[in-house]
Amino acid sequence: MTSGLGATGLLTPLFIGDVLGGLDSIGVPVTQLLQMADSIAFIILAAIGLTVIFGMMGVINLAHGEFIMMGAYITTLSVNVVGLPLPVAMILGALGTAAFGAIIERTIVRRLYGRLLDSMIVTFGLGLILTQGTRIIFGNSLQSIGTPFGNVPGYTYSAYRVLLLFAAIAVLGGAYLVFTRTEFGIQARATIQDAETARTMGVDTDRMYTVTFAIGSGLAGLTGALYAPSATIVPGMGQSFLVESFVTVVTGGSTVLLGTTLAGGVLGTIDAIFSNLYGNFIGQIALLITAIIVIRLLPDGLTGLAHTIRDKLGERQ
Amino acid sequence: MSLEISDLNAGYGETPILRDVEFSVDDGEIVGIVGRNGVGKTTLLKSIMGLLEPETGSITYNSEELTGSSPDERAKRSIGYVPQGRDVFPDLTVKENLLVGESVGGDDETRYEQVYDYFPILEERADQDAGTMSGGQQQMLAIARALVGDPDLLLVDEPSEGVQPSIVQSITEDLKQINEEFGTTILFVEQNLSVIQGLAERCYAIDHGTIVDEITGDAVSERDQLEEYLVV
């Protein structure tokens, strides 16, 4: 099928095939490398929306998986029913989920800031409503879009899944720039740290909460959109992202976007190794054990370790 | 008349704190609210800034009623606020804290670099997380952050609290200079005698949530009269 995704430039399957062929010829285990890239991409993309909503705003959004599912559904329906090109459908998936997130923040989540248990129960209920509502409206599954680009030349591995690693890096970099380099991002972080003081500086904190939650929701929707071509589109698909997303945010620590990057690299590697050797179930057990060890040894997560190293290097200079 | 408070009653829940407060501050003045701990000084500033909605009474600024408007709306009406305990954003850098101070908007001019003239230490620490600075440096940052919004009226809550005496002296001089240079009206609450005498042109004494005295002219520099309202 014609995906509509650009197939020119450096990141073409042919170029990736050439690079991997070169690595293969010097003895690099390419298949394992591809699995690792796939795992890292999955973990970063699974966590990115939650990084903003849970990591920054402190809202435990147990409907995070369903937000991912919503992005996937909007994308798939936009391609299959409306006939939109895949990239446009993906953007629609992200924006549609962001808009839904903004409505949920305004109507429900706004009343639950600082009420951890209540927010967990409410978002869990919201997740159930979304899953069952989707099942009632669209049935048990949707027809798949099909994965674009085929396999990496010379390998039986989806080129699209490899490209998702670059998408994950781009999404992470984009989120980092938005929250650290823009006026909105700085005001949003100030609001989340101390809303009362931010208001006395002229910040419209209500708007900040809504837009930040919408961005987190939109990123979850984008994850669903990016996985829509390669995943089975069912109402419960979001659940498969949930463990990885929470483990990543918790392991990452306080500086959430840096934490997601570090945790994505560490957990993705561990997941790839254990899933490859012992299967997906053991891979997930390995992730949970890693999270427990990291939290036990590094209470501030991987970013705490990174900051300690940075401070020690600073003292030496 | 710049700021006028009349018949102000405010409190937390069922507990009344301010009772029938009345006073006014003219344009360009530096006025101190003096009193012991727990008499309602911070509550008064919070009411003026909109962080606490009064039960009754009126707060007008440049003849416009402020009650009912949100803190961000009041900030956009050119009122700056330096909270008690500084309340800098600890995980934002010094520069980012100052950029938040520009949120009042109004024009596209960037002012955060201008406050470095008053507080050069902030330029040196521009990329440092605000929460890692000393109390005195955080106090400077809190004042600078309010100043980048270019306020006409600056509310300052106990600038000397938790700050070493040499820095307190410096902050007092900075506030005085800001008033002289820009004509910024300053209303501050304080119980440190040296700050009150070094800064205030006149004072109101507050006790049990009520303004009980106005101290003007030479009386501000008389230790005995001020201590009457400060010593327990």
Image (spheres, grey):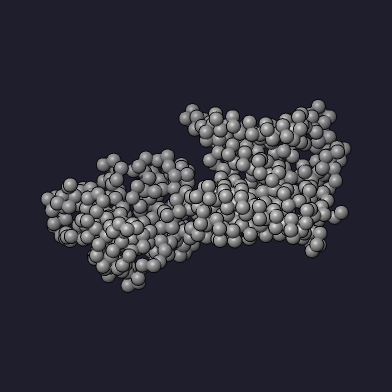
Left or right, A252 with respect to A4, comes to left
Name the foreground residue: A218 vs B82: A218
Residue positioned 45% across, 50% down in the render: A194
> Is A249 on the left or on the right of A21, as rendered?
left
Quadrant position of residue A98: bottom right
Q: Residue at x 82, y 49 (%)?
A: A147
Looking at the picture, how far across and down is residue A288, in whole percent?
64, 34
A108 or A72: nearer the viewer: A108
Q: Which one is nearer the viewer's eye here, A12 or B81?
A: B81
Q: Is residue B231 visible?
A: yes
Residue B200 visible in the picture: no
Rendering coords of residue A8 (x, y %): 80, 50
| Near-viewer residue (B54 or B4) | B54
User: In which quadrant will I find the N terminus of chain B?
Assistant: bottom left
In this rendering, would A152 be left or right of B54?
right
State the count of labels. Answer: 0
In this view, the residue farthest toward the bottom is B63
- The picture places residue A219, in percent across and down from the top left corner, at 65, 51
Q: Reply above or below: B158 against B204.
A: above
State whether residue B179 is above or below residue B131. below
Residue A21 at x, y percent in the picture: 84, 34
The structure residue drawn at horizontal position 76% and vertical position 29%, both measured from the top left corner, is: A278
